Image (cartoon, rainbow, N blue to C red):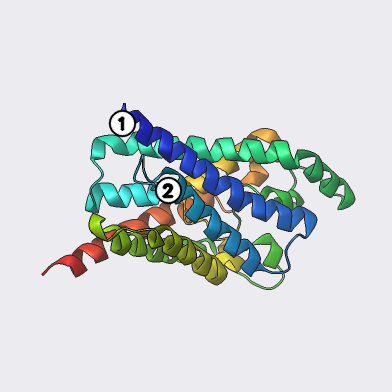
Amino acid sequence: MSYYKELLGEYIGTFILVLFGCGAVASAVLLNAFGSLLEVAIIWGIGVTVAIFAVRNVCPAHLNPAVSIAMALFGNLPLKKLPFYIACQFVGAFSAAALLYFIFGDTIVMFEQTNNIVRGTIESSQTAMIFGEFFPNPSFADKVSISWLEAMILEGIGTFILVFVIFRLTEKKEQIDNFTPILIGLTVTLIICLIAPYTQAGLNPARDFGPRLFAYLTGWGNTAFPIAPFSFFTVYILGPIVGGLGAGLFNKILAKK
């Protein structure tokens, strides 16, 4: 029974993370609810912190395939559990996107009508960004320019930092305390402030692909995916996974006596 609780915990934790994080993006895009990227970044960090606190007593609270893969190869997650952890994380993210659409669906339609946006066209990336990520960030497209390779590297670097911090904070179970989830959340906030203007700072394949798939199925179609062929995979899935593996390897090197 404890194993099923682990999987349920990964599902619920990822659901919470995406619900509040993407919810902040929705409020910023549709309602101009915030004055700066920092406010959205802080809410993402709080969402991560709350998600970890909510489920850490029943699961490791990875909530991110990049973390789970790194932990399976360099930490203490059995490889046989890895596919099920990842599946639950993706489903949790997809479910959160569905609830967000229920909450903001009418507001999205009003925004599209007000701004003459036809869902499914390239202009509808302005609303699709509520779910999946784009590069450059549509909110900063007139200020920055970035290639898919540069975006992939940034996502890898951001995830490297996040996963490295997680390894260092959770390496010794006796040192894990109530500050650990807060520090992880603050790390997410800092990383978002650094790279979100360029890539929206996905850092998490489940957080990206689950909501992106939901957007694809609810009218955005191919617009839900970046223009460059397979760049959603290289930038938002492969980049974070490679970054997480690099962090695990680096931590292992540091841990050697």
The residue depicted at 72 percent of the width and 40 percent of the height is: 103
Q: Residue at x 23, y 53 (%)?
A: 74
- Looking at the picture, tell me which residue is in the foreground, 128 or 16: 16
- Please tell me whether mark 1 sits on a helix, a strand or a loop: helix
Q: Quadrant of the N terminus?
A: top left
Q: Which residue was labeled with disc 1?
A: 2
Amino acid on which disc 1 is placed: Ser
Q: Is residue 61 above or below residue 139?
A: above
Residue 242 x %, y %: 36, 57
The residue lying furthest to the front in this view is 178
Residue 37 in the image: x percent, y percent? 65, 67
Q: Give the Cα separation between the discs numbered 1 and 2.
A: 20 Å
39 and 25: which is toward the camera: 39
Q: Residues within 10 Å of mark 1 (few under 14, many from 20)?
A: few
Horizontal and vertical percent for residue 210?
Answer: 54, 40
The amino acid on which the numbered mark 2 sits, given as a three-letter code, is Asn
Q: Nearer the viewer, residue 35 or 143?
A: 35
Q: Is residue 130 above or below residue 188?
A: above
Res 15 seen here:
yes
> Considering only order in the chain, which callout, 2 or 1, is on the residue closer to the N terminus?
1
Residue 226 seen from this side: no
Residue of label 2: 64
Label drawn at residue 80: none
User: Which of the two discs, 1 and 2, sits closer to the camera?
Assistant: 1
The answer to whether residue 7 is left or right of residue 51 is left
Q: Residue at x 74, y 49 (%)?
A: 124
Query: Where residue 34 sits: x, y (%)?
Result: 72, 63
In which quadrant of the rendered view does residue 178 lie?
Answer: bottom left
